[in-house]
Amino acid sequence: MLMEFNAVYVIVAREFKKFVRERSRLFSAIARPLLWLFIVGAGMSRLVPRDTGVPYTQFIFPGIIGMTILFSSMFSSISIIWDKEFGFMKEILVAPVSRLSIVVGKALSGTIVSTIQALIILAFFPVIGFKLGFLQIIAVTFICASVSFCISAFGIVLASFYESYESFSVIMNFIIMPMFFLSGAMYPVKFLPAVLRLVAKLNPLTYGIDVMKHAIFPHETGSMGPDFSIMRSVLVIILASAAFVLIAGKAFERKG
């Protein structure tokens, strides 16, 4: 058991050191959601009726945090591709530790990096008129960590089936933006056509953003409020995280 914990710690520490050294990665990850929040959000707010109960820039704020988590968590799984190309993954796979420890270590490293970036975006809440209490901030922090782990594990599942950065980056482009737009980030899921609403319900990010809406504006029950019950969203995130970890573990066993 101690060896498993050591393996997780080594993987997390290695990925975190890489993140600290790559400052440009942090700046670019923060710049994208801020542009969406203050430029796209400001423009779209002119097209949204003002009597919806929640200003549009406030409505998309949980979605912008979700965008930060999505991009950061998914791109953190790229490290698996680099590890494969440079042979580090082979060294990990021959170590006397379970494949689940490797997956959990990679997912936790992506979780830490993504949560840090999400909290930086969260710090802008006074700028757009939010008044969040201490308990709300703590709740959003835990939600960000949970969603980051889920999306990181999903990214690991995808990365386990690819051997080169080029092939992985192509499939990523077909996954990230649809996941974002079909997550309730920019508009309520309940307003989508039936087919797209069904696809949105299969998207784990949908439930992560929905939980954030419960935490950030808990008393909003109108059209711009959460789409699902908080228990349903939390349960989906937990089950999806467990499923992705198990699938990734099996995928690594196949390659071991």
Image (spheres, grey):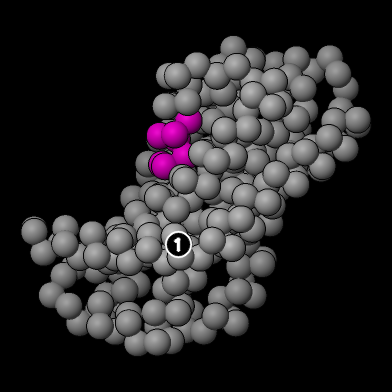
Q: Relative to residue 200, is residue 129 depicted above or below?
A: above
In the picture as drawn, the residue positioned furthest to the left comes out as 1
- Residue furthest out toward the top: 219
Above or below, 185 relative to 7: above
Residue 154 x/y as whole percent: 46, 58
Instruction: Name the amino acid type tagged 1.
Output: Phe
Question: Where residue 128 appears, x then y in whole percent?
Answer: 71, 26
Q: In which quadrant will I find the C terminus?
A: bottom left
Q: Position of residue 63 (x, y in %)?
A: 64, 38
Residue 194 quadrant: top right
For disc 1, the marked residue is 19
Tell me if residue 142 is in the magenta stretch: yes
The structure residue drawn at horizontal position 29% and vertical position 84%, both measured from the top left corner, is: 90
- Answer yes or no: is residue 247 visible: no
| Circle 1 crowding by C-alpha within 10 Å: few under 14, some 14–19, many from 20 | some
Magenta span: chief secondary structure: helix
Question: Which residue lies most toward the right here?
Answer: 47
Magenta-tinted stretch: 140-146
In the rendered view, tell whether residue 202 sits above or below residue 125. Answer: below
> Which image quarter: residue 49?
top right
